[in-house]
Image (cartoon, helix red, strand yellow):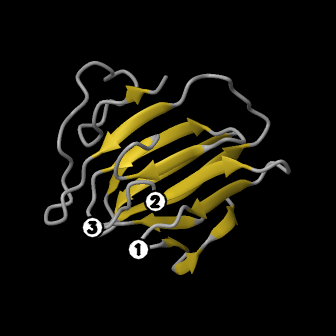
Amino acid sequence: MKVTLNILDGKTKALIKTLSILISETGITIGRANSTLNILDPLTSRRHAGLRRAANGELILEDLGSRNGCFVNGSKIKAIALKQGDEFAIGNVKFIVGALEKNIRSAAPALSANLGITRSTGEWLKESQNLKHLFSHPLIQEPVTKN
């Protein structure tokens, strides 16, 4: 499944980045460290949430036992099927689900991106130098390929 996520600063509501991500049954993790998508935010747990494709093709967001929880459209959740237009919050970062392409599958390795929000400014820490063609926004840190 291919999903488009609009990533927003939770405080200012400013659009940070739009990402298109391939998500399989094993899914991706979102957290502060050692995750597919790293958010450097003090309200985000190390392994905060997971996004995966269910057998029926739905996009599932699951709280992985985080301290501060996951919120979808303002309600705290443990696990929920997401649809286009849903907004979910992890720490100080909001994600809006854009296009969902359910018939796309990939065996490609996961790509990690480190998003570095500081609590006080909501500004990002560094710009990707090596992969600007993939992540050309100055608010996204350099992605790291996991083996």
Q: Is residue 126 positioned above or below 131 on the image?
A: below
Q: Residue furthest left?
A: 120
Residue under numbered circle 1: 68
Which callout, 1 or 2, points at the residue further toward the start of the chain? 2
Q: Residue at x 23, y 22 (%)?
A: 129
User: Which of the pair 121/136 is nearer the observer?
Assistant: 121
Which callout, 3 or 2, points at the residue further toward the start of the chain? 3
The residue mark sitting in front, 3 or 2, is: 2
User: Which of the pair 112/14 is nearer the observer?
Assistant: 112
Q: Is residue 142 positioned above or below 10 on the image?
A: above
> Looking at the picture, how far across and down is residue 35, in whole percent?
44, 44
CA distance separating discs 3 and 2: 22 Å
Amino acid type of the residue that numbered disc 1 sits on in the rendered structure: Asn
Q: Residue at x 53, y 30 (%)?
A: 110
Residue under numbered circle 2: 48
Residue under numbered circle 3: 12
Q: Residue at x 14, y 61 (%)?
A: 121
CA distance separating discs 3 and 1: 20 Å
Q: Is residue 24 positioned above or below 144 on the image?
A: below
Q: Badge 2: few (under 14), some or many (20 or more) residues near its Cα, within 10 Å?
A: many
The residue mark sitting in front, 3 or 1, is: 1
